Every structure is written in structure tokens, then in C-alpha cells.
Image (tube, helix red, strand yellow):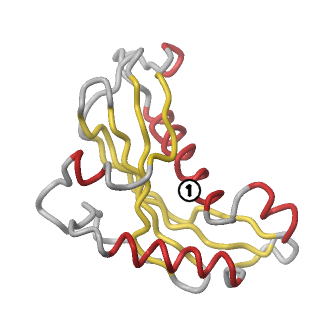
Amino acid sequence: MPTTQASLNDIRQLEKMHQQRIPSAFMDENSHMNVQYYVHVAEQGLSEFLRRVGMGEFYAVADKFGNFALEQHIRYYAEILTGDQVSVHVRLIDVSPKRCYMMGFLINDTREQLAATVEVVMMNIDMVRRRGAPFPDEAKVALDSLHAQHCGLGWEAPVCGVMRA
């Protein structure tokens, strides 16, 4: 596991997949964003990432495939408060024939802080059989291309060290 945290400049080399202002409805009794909304906000960015590689809503309808999360790991670095502007940047960590391992970086743009990372291993699913299936050729090519691009960034993703695609 890397011992250093990626800088905001490093993370911002990744395309921004989602951005939003945090409403008061996302707060918990400690007056900061509730855990469930870290996952919700990260999911918005991860879903957009999958859509951009051809595996979004229309993918499921047209090809009868879907994506199931198999494992998640969340690491919190800083609070997110009501009114903060946050963005999600996604890095593809690994790809196998049926799975991909992604990391969503939640940046608190208001406070210029990395607020959290959400690592997810997801599997491509044949929705008719409800079983894992290889990625369709076009999606696999897009994932492999992005994976190669992300491997060449020059900085290590601060992964938990126990997840694999």
C-alpha cells in the first residue's frame, strides 16, 4: 500500500466525472456529510465513468448486461459540510475479462482537500443468466485503453491493498 497520499494536482489529471454542491439533507447528527452520501456521491462519478466507456444505462437495455459491485473500501480524509462543492475523479486501477477495479476520489473543491476515496470492484453481469460474463469487446477495448492511460500517470493510487479485479 502506498505510504503517500496523491496530491490534488495528481488527482485532477483524471477527468472529472461528477460535481455537486452538498445539501443540508446529506448531513448527520455530527453536522457533516453522512457516510451513505459519500458512497452516493462517489457512485454518481463511478456511474458516469462506466457510461463513458459504453457500460451505462443503454448498455444494460441494449445488450442485457449490467454491473454489480462485489467489494468496496472507503477511506475518509476530511469532512464535507453543507454547501461544500465536491467533485469526483475516477481512476481505473485494474481490469480483468469480467471485472474492473476503480477508485473514486472525492475532492472538496470548496476547501481544496481530498475528502475521501471509494474503491470498488465491479463485475460485468449477463442479466439474463444473472451470472458474471466477459465484457463485450467494445467495452473491454475502452477499459483496456483507459487502464493503460491511468497506469502511465506517474503516481500511485492510494489503494487499500486487499482488492483485485
Q: Is residue 60 left or right of residue 161?
A: right
Q: Tell me where residue 51 sits by quadrant.
A: bottom right
Relative image position of residue 76 (x, y in whole percent): 29, 41
Q: Nearer the viewer, residue 76 or 53?
A: 53
Q: Is residue 165 left or right of residue 130?
A: left
Q: Is residue 82 left or right of residue 48?
A: left
Relative image position of residue 111 (x, y in whole percent): 25, 25
Pointer 1 residue: 49
Q: Judging from the image, what secondary structure is the residue with disc 1 in? A: helix
Q: Residue at x 38, y 41 (%)?
A: 106
Q: Residue at x 55, y 46 (%)?
A: 43
- Characterize the local packing of mark 1: few (<14), some (14-19) or many (20 or more) Cα atoms within 10 angstroms: many
Q: Nearer the viewer, residue 52 or 73?
A: 52
Q: Tell me where residue 130 sits by quadrant.
A: bottom right
Q: Amino acid at mark 1?
A: Phe
Relative image position of residue 80 (x, y in whole percent): 34, 26
Q: Tell me where residue 160 sits by quadrant.
A: bottom left
Vertical side of 37 occupied by 125: above or below: below
Q: Residue at x 32, y 54 (%)?
A: 13
Q: Residue at x 61, y 52 (%)?
A: 47
Quarter of the picture containing the N terminus is bottom left
Q: Nearer the viewer, residue 73 or 114?
A: 114
Relative image position of residue 157 (x, y in whole percent): 27, 63
Q: Is residue 8 left or right of residue 164?
A: left
Number of numbered labels in the structure image:
1
Vertical side of 162 occupied by 134: above or below: below
